[in-house]
Image (spheres, rainbow, N blue to C red):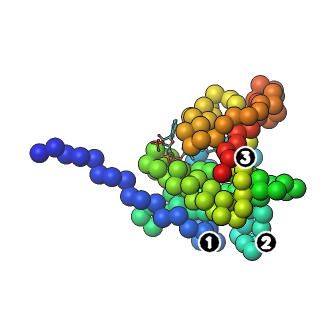
Amino acid sequence: MTLRPKPAPQPNIRRITRKDKPALIKILRSTPEFKPFEVAVAEELINASLDDPCSSEYYILVADVLGVPAGYICYGPTPVTLGTWDIYWEAVARECQGQGVGRALMAAALKEIKETGGRLAVIETSGIPSYEKTRRYYAGLGFETVARIPDFYAPGDDQLILVKRL
Ligand SMILES: CC(C)(COP(=O)(O)OP(=O)(O)OC[C@H]1O[C@@H](n2cnc3c(N)ncnc32)[C@H](O)[C@@H]1OP(=O)(O)O)[C@@H](O)C(=O)NCCC(=O)NCCS
């Protein structure tokens, strides 16, 4: 008899609630790619979304795996554009990475963006080596690197602009 690996449980994608915040902050804090000040900014966006879910410029979807938040994605319409949306943040708990949670979150966000009339999704990310895996992940999801601003985040830390037409 051959033993097959158990398929990973399907994530349930839903809107954020206030109860999710501690779990999401824990995920952000234990993600080595994120510096403490980045975690602080990510937390501000979570707060903005929770405090004003109806008119917030920040939309958040959470992925539950077996009833526990395993990751989230934060996105919103880019001000002064027609149909362009920013994907601000995405993070999946380390123990849940590589099981399709990130892809499911991105697919749900892009579907919602498209249904609201969005036509372009934009991601700003770093060009440093520790983001190489993340860049490959985005490339696999069909995002194309269209620009690079040298030394944007810090000397030697370029900003890459990735886009996907919807
Ligand atoms: C980037 C991240 C959100 C991806 O989420 P994930 O749940 O691990 O990714 P998935 O399992 O859904 O993978 C989706 C696809 O990307 C590929 N992929 C995932 N991680 C990858 C990597 N490190 N390198 C290359 N491809 C990768 C998978 O093979 C999969 O492709 P497939 O569907 O064709 O098999 C997650 O790894 C993460 O939180 N990383 C740290 C934080 C971060 O960099 N966030 C983004 C910047 S804000």
Residue at image point 19% right, 45% down: 3
Q: Quadrant of residue 10?
A: bottom left
Q: Earlier in the sequence, mark 1 or mark 3?
A: 1
Q: Is residue 143 left or right of residue 77?
A: left
Circle 3 residue? 122
Secondary structure beneath dot 1 equals loop
Measured as percent of width and height from the top left, residue 131 is found at 63, 34
Q: Residue furthest left?
A: 1
Q: Are marks 1 and 3 in contact (CB under 8 Å)?
A: no
Q: CA distance from mark 1 to mark 3?
A: 25 Å
Q: Earlier in the sequence, mark 1 or mark 2?
A: 1
The amino acid marked with disc number 2 is: Ser
Secondary structure beneath dot 2 equals loop
For label 3, count other residues whose C-alpha is less than 10 Å away and answer few (under 14), some (14-19) or many (20+): many
For label 2, count other residues whose C-alpha is less than 10 Å away and answer few (under 14), some (14-19) or many (20+): few
For this rendering, which residue is in front, 95 or 116? 116
Nearer the observer: mark 2 or 3; the answer is 3
Circle 1 residue? 17
In this orientation, does residue 126 appear? no
Q: CA distance from mark 2 to mark 3?
A: 21 Å
The amino acid marked with disc number 3 is: Val
Q: Are marks 1 and 2 in contact (CB under 8 Å)?
A: no
Circle 2 residue? 55
The amino acid marked with disc number 1 is: Thr
